[in-house]
Image (cartoon, helix red, strand yellow):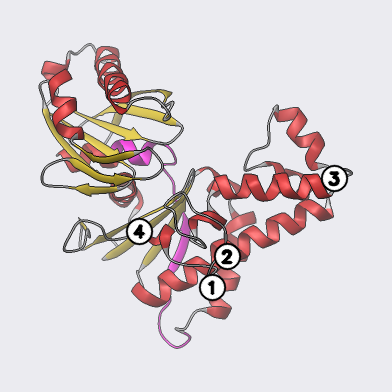
Amino acid sequence: MYIGIDLGGTNIAAGVVDADGRLISSGAVPTRSERPTIEIVRDMAELAREVAADCGMELADIKAVGIGCPGTINFETGEVIYSNNIKMEHFPLAEEFRKLADLTVKVDNDANCAAMGEYLVNGGGAKSFMLITLGTGVGSGLVVNGSVYRGFNGAASEAGHITLVSGGELCTCGKKGCWEAYASATALVKQTEKAMEEHPESLMHKVAEEFGKINGQTAFLAAKSGDEAAQAVVDAYIRYVADGIVSVENMLQPEVIAIGGGISREGEGLLGPVRDYVEKNGFNKFMEKTRITAAGLFNDAGIIGAAAIAM
């Protein structure tokens, strides 16, 4: 048995995974990313103990732990070189975790882990498979011939930080105009909030009130009820997502691009228009084209993929 931990900007998720990639038990706790990093590591270790206990095991029964962490990772040492969504710089994550749980620990970029998990379960044997997650940020991971592609320095596949709008919205990485600043769920919430301020009559206010907050579903749900202001938000957001995918496809031409993250639950309401836009605007108009699909594992992808990295 292995444990996979998905360290996200909002939640820490963990689970016990068997050697066939089956998720046996799982749990989650809030990240509270503003606090000292060592406190987050303690919560990760405690959560690992809890999910092991749910299976009637102790940590000593676990063969290895994999951790998916946002940012640039030294895969060989387990050091987080830089993370902007959870503030870390040259932080020895694997070493600190081992102090709390005496296990073999492997650390990789969270999107790399999610891509591996999604590929193992839903990749269909594709020779090149890319996962793009629309969450707190825009994550991406590329699997080529069954292995994660990390680049010569471990920093590859940061599609969220390609420039979408030169000099545009400020990204958490410090640069302006990143794809992440327009196509993440965080960006969608900001776009929804702005539209709600400009349109006090919009159904988005009622939807947000019913949910108790503004989230990534707010504009989509109001648009389905015919709200024009919400539809404008949805149309602009879909264009941002699709423009980034066109760039990714033009550069890499992967066999499959899977879109994950909470927004992907919109299904064909998101994917249909994205496919249409990519079809019309992609450079490749003469050969077999990339298949764009929804990811299937949702929140479990990072857990299963992190465990697979540990395997």
Mark 2 vs mark 4: give the one in front: 4
- Secondary structure found at label 3: loop
**Side (left or right) of 103 relative to 256:** left
Q: Quadrant of residue 99?
A: top left
Report whether residue 121 is seen: yes
Which residue bears the numbered disc 2? 274
Q: Which residues are magenta?
A: 285-304
Q: Residue at x 36, y 41 (%)?
A: 301
Which residue bears the numbered disc 4? 158
Identity, as a three-letter code, of the amino acid under mark 2 = Val
Circle on res. 278: 1
How many dots with numbers? 4
Report whether residue 101 is seen: no
Q: Quadrant of residue 88?
A: top left
Mark 4 vs mark 1: give the one in front: 4
Farthest residue in the bottom direction?
286
Q: Residue at x 83, y 42 (%)?
A: 203
Earlier along the polypeptide chain: callout 4 or callout 1?
A: 4
Does 210 sit above or below residue 178?
Answer: above
